[in-house]
Image (spheres, rainbow, N blue to C red):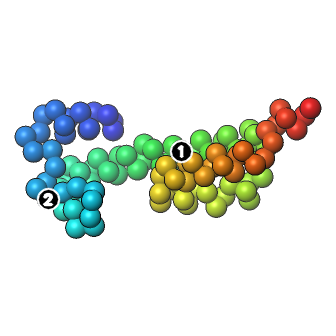
Amino acid sequence: LYLVLAVNLMAFEKEPLPEGGGYDTLQQVVTLFSDKRAVLGGWTHYIAFDLLAARFIVQDSQEAGIPHLAIVWIIPLVLLFGPIGFALYFVVKSIYPTGKAKAQ
């Protein structure tokens, strides 16, 4: 769904972004999200990346034997800051030995 929305917006719309919209300043972001298509795209991105990344982190940490309390604080960071929280998970994961390493 996200891919379809992105291709539609970029390939078939005459003006893909509202005039003055962008990511450089807060005002540009506000202008960008005044367009319903941009809000739909942003919300779909939130669902597509952030929620699936959080789900992956929970499942992967359980398989790796990482204590739940070691990763539970990362989930809000993933949901709020996306890639930063996802990267932090891998930092935490590197601290804990995996299930295979513990068995040896």
Q: SS for tag 2? A: loop
Answer above or below: position of 42 versus 98: below
| Pick the front one: 104 or 36 | 104
Most distant residue in the right direction = 104
Compare residues 15 and 41 and report the one nearer the observer: 15
Q: Residue farthest to the left? A: 14
Q: Which of label 2 and label 1 is nearer to you?
A: 2
Looking at the picture, which amino acid does disc 2 mark?
Gly
Quarter in which the N terminus is drawn = top left
Q: CA distance from mark 2 to mark 1?
A: 31 Å
Q: Which mark is residue 53?
A: 1
Camera-nearest residue between 71 and 91: 91
Q: Residue at coordinates 10% horizontally, 56% vertically from top-left?
A: 19
On-image quarter of the C terminus: top right
Identify the residue at horizontal 85%, vertical 35% (top origin): 101
- Of the image marks 2 and 1, the number of the one nearer the N terminus: 2
Instruction: Decide: few, some or many residues near mark 2? Use Cα within 10 Å; few <14, some 14-19, many ≥20.
Output: few
Image coords of residue 4 (percent x, y): 28, 33
Q: Amino acid at mark 1?
A: Ala
Find residue 74 and report its image quarter: bottom right
User: Can you see residue 7?
Assistant: yes
Residue 58 position within the rendered picture, expressed as x and y whole percent measured from the top left: 65, 47
Q: Is residue 33 visible?
A: no
Dot 2 corresponds to which residue?
A: 20
**Hey, which quadrant is residue 22 in on the image?**
bottom left
